[in-house]
Image (spheres, grey):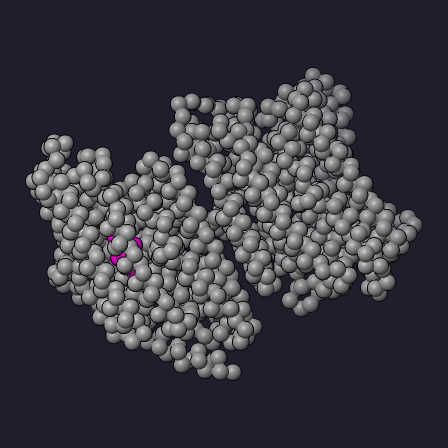
Amino acid sequence: MITLILPNLSENLQAILPEISLALTLVAIVLFDLIFIKSKKFLPLISIIGLIVTFSFVILQFGDPKYAFAVSGNLSFLSLDNFSAFFKLLILITTLFIVLFSMSSQEVNSCPDRHGEYYALILGMVIGMFFMVSANDLILIYLSLELLSLSSYVLAGFVKTSIRNSEASLKYIIYGSASSGIMLFGISILYGISGSTNLHEINSILQSPTANQLTFLMSILMIFAGIGFKISIVPFHFWTPDVYEGAPISITAFLSVASKAAGFAVLIRFLKITFAQGLDKSGYWQMLSYIDWQMLLISFSIITMTFGNFAALWQDNLKRMLAYSSIAHAGYLMLGVAVLSDQGLMAVLVYFSIYLFMNLGAFYVVMLIANKINSEEIDDYKGLGYSLPLLGTALGIFLVSLTGLPPTAGFIGKLYLFIALVDANMITVAIIALLNTVVSLYYYIRVLKAMFLDKTDKKVEINLSPLNYIVLLLLIAPVLILGVYFTPLVNIAKESVQLLGF
Amino acid sequence: MFLLLNTGMMGVFVALDFFLFYIFWELMLLPMYFLIGIWGGPRREYAAIKFFLYTLLGSIFILLVMIGLYFSSMETLADGTRVFTFNLLELMNHANYTETGILSPLNPNNLRFIAYIGLFIGFAIKIPMFPFHTWLPDAHVEAPTAISVILAGVLLKMGTYGILRISYPVFPELTYQLSWYIALFGMINIIYGALAAMAQKDFKKLIAYSSVSHMGFVMLGMSALNTMGISGAILQMFNHGTITAMLFLIVGVIYDRAHTRDLDSFGGLGKQMPIYTGFVTIAFFAAIGLPGLSGFISEALVFLGGFGNGTTRILTVISTLGILLGAAYMLWTLQRVYLGSLNEKWKDLTDLTTREYFMLVPLTIIVIYLGVNPSPMLNLMNASANAMVKFISDAQGIYSSLNAF
């Protein structure tokens, strides 16, 4: 057990400057909310400023890997490496977009007196995720996961008057608490085996195989249940469609990108730091041979993507369909992890950065349209491509990108994933994943079909504010540009695969 | 949409890099979906999604082979470093392959055979080769006339172009071994397409199946692996583009006026629209392969080439039956629609307008000119066809020596 002796507190505090600045922003929001009871329009502005300050702190963390709150050597609570900085950036960008989303979301604006909690909780989630992506200790992983979850439970039911919201929140709490309980149990078993909660220390203890196979497998599966709940892989996905459909759209988008990113960061760090012995010269991780890691991860991912894609085929609600599609995407991302190599990790990072823009974009358009027509049913989208050419085209681009067709960025994400797979000689898996892509085309194109091919007399008009145009542009531009010019992103991702300790 | 489609098509034909080729290849799918889906006939949605799913299924195989090839070959850059490459010219050179690449001929356990099949299926769906052809009649029937013309005139060629451009140079040894099967499928295409065309009642569907039949000639010519066969195949691609474009325009003209394509409801249009019928006759005769029109030259070259190669000789002989069947369904159609007594219902139909002259006259000129004097085209392609043939026959020696150790 680590005893907390911190000789150089100021240095350690400097290492968590981003988290501190987020916490200060949170406090500022709460204070402003209390002082200026009438006017709430400052709150998003404060959040945006806080996020931008944090952004600059995170940028400074690039290229400067170190342990923070360390007792000695790598026995630390946090490891601040490029990998965590990359994920922090992803989370920050997502949060910025979500704050911008919320400013024009009707659902959020319908409860103006509670805006203070809304933005405070979002920032609370972000702090949780920040600690999650750099946590180096099982206790901290668990605590930050809970911080994230608790805030998101409340946010999912933010519109109290809406039954759908409350139902989503309740379901989320029940599933969430059960799975985090299971995860805690798994952590305690792992602690029982190894006598430590530090990932590095567990690794060095596990190097000499003493543990009972069955116990070990049980604890791993239990921890997977906790993380799998966050990234919604099958069979821990049951909450996803209901919560995504019920929650306010801005929160749905946030859950589907940011909290998934944090979950993946934890999964990758947990796997690589705890169970990898070392790297071979082409970047493959040599895993401790307790269980067949690759088989386990591949089966998770194939089941996840196949289930997600096939379930999405029958959905008539666009939000629900996007929920299943995000399950399917979690499956693709898991494939990148399952390769167990730096190449695969890079593919995950690239895929995630692209997934961020396309998924947020899809949700954004759905939100703007839902603000007006109060519906997310695909049937209500008939002919929208003609009455709303801009939004229709934008949604079209995002959906095509989610399918993974060139020249959109989604193709590049998939391409790197398949490159990693083929490089690792996992051809069969690659073929299954590609066939899944063909299946997914059908339900994405269904929306386009409703929008452009079905004619209707109904005319819908939406007046977009300049802010809406800017956000839309900021989301579309990366999807199109990264589809053609992706080298910078790939280079950043290449830099960011280095985890501290390897 | 149409311009985006054109970008894709141009891109495919100029790309010398497999990656670019693939990007452009995929780029064409989406505009095509919308072109058929928005402006098509009554069953347009079904046809559009069928087209999309079929071709996407084909392209995932191409994508996999592409990635596999990327990891199997190294290109030497100007500064001497060696990197993985998508460059097709480098992929042609067996010396660029790595020892362990899964698609490398130097690797004794390579998967080149499977990759070749995958790649071939990918392109075959586009050709479309039997048994992957079922999207074509649907897409053609539902698509508006202009899109049908593009679909038949250019899009189908991409399949055969892809085979010539990628399958042949990158996998020369397998091409040689499998040429009999390519010819077999060519033959099936010819005969099956012709028989299916004969059974159609819908004018446009008939043309669609005739185009399946004609693409069979292209495949037969390619499989011959000699200069005559390959240049015949390329010329046939071009001629098929012009002739089928004419045929679809002809259907478009009549559909514009009569709003039906049912063959049996017409009759005696020759009296009502004499000039139009003149164009029809030229197009039909060219499609049959009557001497003096361009279809004859390419089909003759294909047959000569196919007959000249011992492996494909018997298949070629059977394929000549296709000409007979072609004449049968074309002439039968001519008789049903344009000859005989005029159906009273159609006595108000007018002859061609200026716009339609502009469409049909240039194509007719090309068809007749190439039928009389094909050498300008043949000269253009002779050098590359020769090079291709030489490359493939050279490659046999190289690759068999590679497999020896």
Quarter containing the C terminus of chain A? bottom right
Q: Is residue B214 magenta?
A: yes
Specify whether A309 is left or right of B359: right
Q: Is residue A463 above or below residue A211?
A: above
The x, y position of residue A160, in whole percent, is 70, 22
Note whether residue A69 is visible.
no
The x, y position of residue B179, in whole percent, is 36, 70
The x, y position of residue A340, in whole percent, is 67, 59
Specify whether B376 is left or right of A23: left
Please give the name of the residue rendered at 37% of the width and 60% of the height, measured from the top-left corner. B162
Q: How many numbered badges does the structure rendering display?
A: 0
Q: Is residue A43 magenta?
A: no
Q: Nearer the viewer, residue A231 or A11?
A: A231
Residue stretch rendered in magenta on the structure = B210-216
The x, y position of residue B38, in whole percent, is 36, 36
Q: Is residue A276 above or below residue A301?
A: below
Please give the name of the residue rendered at 75% of the width and 44% of the height, measured from the top-left corner. A226
Q: Nearer the viewer, residue B331 or A213?
A: B331
Q: Main secondary structure of the magenta part?
A: helix
Please give the name of the residue rendered at 89% of the width and 54% of the height, measured from the top-left corner. A195
Please give the name of the residue rendered at 59% of the width and 64% of the height, measured from the top-left corner. A425
The image quarter containing residue A144 is: top right
Q: Residue furthest top?
A: A38
The image quarter containing residue B374 is: bottom left
Q: Is residue B310 above or below residue A354?
A: below
Q: Nearer the viewer, residue A55 or B200?
A: B200
Q: Is residue A423 above or below residue B203?
A: below
Note whether residue A314 is visible.
yes
Q: Nearer the viewer, residue A52 or A379?
A: A379
